[in-house]
Structures are given as C-alpha cells and as structure tokens.
Image: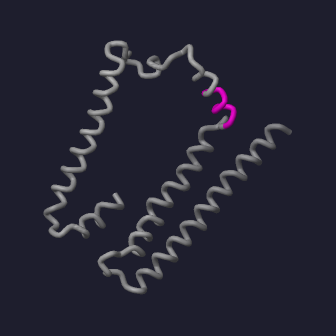
C-alpha cells in the first residue's frame, strides 16, 4: 500500500504502472512455480498433502522445536517484537530514507529535515515499543515464578 504512489511517481508515464504491476506479478508467479517445481522434482510422489507430515519425524527436528519452544514459550512475544519493528521500518524509516537519497533532486531542504525527524521519531518509538514488550514479558515471567 505505501509503495504504490512513490513507484508511480518515479515512472516516466503513469500508464507504465500497469506494466510494472504485470512484470512484478509475473516475477512472483515465476519464482513460486520454480520453487514448487524444484520441490516436486526433488521429492516426487513422496510429498503428502499435509505439509507438516512431510517433515522427517525421526530427525533432530523435534529437539530443535523443543529448544525453540523453551526459548520462546509465548509466540505472541515474538509477534509483538516483529510487528513493532517491521511496521515502523516499512511505514516510516524506508520512506524517509528514500527522501534523503533523492537521486533526482526533487526534495527540498524542508523535506529532508522532515525525513530526518520522521526517522528519528520512528527509531525512538520503535525502541520504546520493544522495551515495553521486553519489560512486560520479564515482569510477567517474574509474576509467574513468585
């Protein structure tokens, strides 16, 4: 959603947007097809319809899964961490960095100052969100043990 308008603005003609979308969709379909086809060639008819059943149950994967489950007992903690960082970077830091890069010289001094302020604000708020997530997880663990 956030990248459509800057991409369209960078194109020479607005009608080139249709070509850009078609090329990106074709590239995505080609990559998915190549990965799926290679997987089928590698494993053949031994692929089961239930994807988790395809993994080797006799390997060390249950041990690895158990270790990860101990390290991250609540998957929501991981989701909160990933969400608080990813959204901030995609919505604020990357667009600000694009304004600062400005290879065409379109942005003004005011635009660059605003971009720096947005990036700083995004990093500060992301740091606050991460610290709140970590602190609440630590406090929750200490309440459980007491």
Horizontally, is 11 left or right of 76 in the view?
Answer: left
In this picture, is 33 found above or below 13?
A: above
What is the quadrant of residue 109 in the picture?
bottom left
Q: Residue furthest front?
A: 42
Q: Would you say 47 lies left or right of 144 here?
A: left
Left or right? Give the position of 76 relative to 2: right
The N terminus - image quarter: bottom left
- Quadrant assignment, res 51: top left
Q: Residue furthest bottom?
A: 109
Please state which of residues 34 and 19 is positioned toward the viewer in this rendering: 34
Where does the image place residue 69, in percent across and percent down from the top left?
64, 31
Residue drawn at 16 percent across, 55 percent down: 19
Is 68 drawn above or below residue 41 in the view shown?
A: below
Task: Where is residue 59? Give x, y as percent.
Answer: 56, 17
Main SS category, magenta section: helix
Residue 67 lies in the magenta-colored region: yes
- In the picture shown, does residue 51 fall above or below 141? above
Is residue 107 highlighted in magenta? no
Q: Position of residue 10 (x, y in %)?
A: 25, 69
Residue at 54%, 15% (x, y): give it: 57
Eyeballing the image, is 90 above or below 32?
below
Q: Quadrant of the C terminus?
A: top right
Q: Residue at x 65, y 26 (%)?
A: 66
- Residue visible at 41% across and 81% down? 111
State the residue in front, 124 or 30: 30
Q: Position of residue 128 (x, y in %)?
A: 64, 62
Residues shaded magenta: 65-71
């Amino acid at each position: 959603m956030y990248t459509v308008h800057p991409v369209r603005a960078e194109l020479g003609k607005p009608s080139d947007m249709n070509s850009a979308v078609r090329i990106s969709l074709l590239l995505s379909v080609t990559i998915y097809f190549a990965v799926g086809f290679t997987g089928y060639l590698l494993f053949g008819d031994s692929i089961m319809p239930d994807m988790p059943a395809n993994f080797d149950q006799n390997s060390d994967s249950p041990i690895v899964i158990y270790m990860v489950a101990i390290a991250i007992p609540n998957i929501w903690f991981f989701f909160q961490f990933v969400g608080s960082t990813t959204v901030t970077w995609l919505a604020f830091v990357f667009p600000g960095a694009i304004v600062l890069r400005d290879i065409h010289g379109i942005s003004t001094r005011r635009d660059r100052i605003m971009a720096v302020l947005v990036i700083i604000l995004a990093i500060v708020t992301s740091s606050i969100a991460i610290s709140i997530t970590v602190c609440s997880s630590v406090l929750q663990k200490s309440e459980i043990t007491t």
